[in-house]
Amino acid sequence: MEFHADIGPQYEGEVIRKEDLYMEFGGPKVTHKFELATLKRPEEIENEKVELIGPDISELEPYDEVKGGGSYPIAVLVDIAGEELDKDAESIIERKIHMYTNYTEGWYHMNQRDAMWMRVNKDCAKKGFNSLKELGEIYNFLFTSEMAIIEKIQTTIITDEEKIAKLLPQALEIYKARDNRALTLRDEDVDTFYGCVLCQSFAPTHISIIAPDRIANCGAINWFDGRAAAKIDPEGPIFAIPKGKLIDPIKGEYEGVNKVEYEKSLATYDRVYLYSAFEHPHTSCG
């Protein structure tokens, strides 16, 4: 497929400052925004369909350095189907929206869930990238190209604020249910934690440790999500960590975690306390 922007992991880490900003969706200036992936039955999905509800990039006023503006509500809905998929995959699909947006030259994505934030730069707009439907097509293309486990996919992007405001409470309830499920498990109940290096495009020495008692730094990946991600995409940015010998039960130090911390942080850190902010604190991407 041909797009108005180049696509690849080399564009991860690209930051769009206000002097290069053409338009943004979500972010701190916008009240209504969210991303949600939903597992559905195959017959409920029109494969590779992209639907836009609300005004498109070409119909919206861009950011102006004098007048400001250029910030708009957005919801990104990705519906998936596949015989080997289960509900735990939904949050993993949502997190990959972050990665695939940043794969797109001229686009920038931060955060997740109802805190998501996307920007497109001026050069990208000049090249003719003037429709969010194209972004949806990129999502469909990358998801199906990189995740064979997805048999059918459909993407809906909404910029109609009234529609987003109506759907947002439902999304928040889904997020809450996922988080509540994670509260049923404790660190001592498992032998394996999970690590995530998805944000190393922005923070090269950061590794997020995901344990039953400690959600990922992004606030959106719990232990069940990490397990699902490592299973679905064994070569991906989320991987299993044998937690190893418990060194300190109060501060949360584990032999296996220290080893992986050293390996994945470019030898920057060799110890991490999962539950201390003062001594050997967990790394952060921002």
Image (cartoon, rainbow, N blue to C red):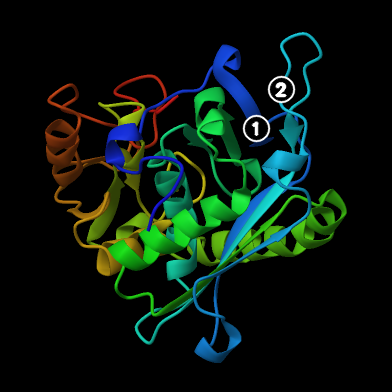
Mark 1, secondary structure of its residue: strand
Q: Quadrant of residue 260?
A: top left
Q: Quadrant of residue 265?
A: top left
- Say the numbered circle drawn on residue 24: 1
Say which residue label 2 marks. 63
38 left or right of 103 in image: right
Q: Quadrant of residue 148?
A: bottom left
Picture coordinates of residue 207 (x, y %)?
A: 29, 36
Q: Which of labels 2 and 1 is toward the front?
A: 2
- Give whichever of 30, 259 is nearer the camera: 30
Q: Quadrant of the C terminus?
A: top left
Closer to the chain start, of discs 2 and 1, is 1
- Say the numbered circle drawn on residue 270: none
Location of residue 190 with respect to 121 vertically, above or below = below
Tell which residue pokes out farthest to the top in this image. Answer: 66
Real-space Cα separation, disc 2 to disc 1, in angstroms: 8 Å
Q: Are marks 2 and 1 in contact (CB under 8 Å)?
A: yes
Name which residue type carries label 2: Tyr
Location of residue 92 with respect to 32 vertically, above or below = below
Picture coordinates of residue 243 (x, y %)?
A: 20, 51
Location of residue 220 with respect to 26 vertically, above or below = below
Q: Residue at x 39, y 19 (%)?
A: 278
Q: Residue at x 75, y 37 (%)?
A: 72
Label 2 environment density (alpha carbons within 10 Å; few <14, some 14–19, many ≥20) = some
- Give whichever of 155, 22 is nearer the camera: 22
Mark 2, secondary structure of its residue: loop
Q: Residue at x 65, y 30 (%)?
A: 23
Picture coordinates of residue 95 (x, y %)?
A: 45, 52
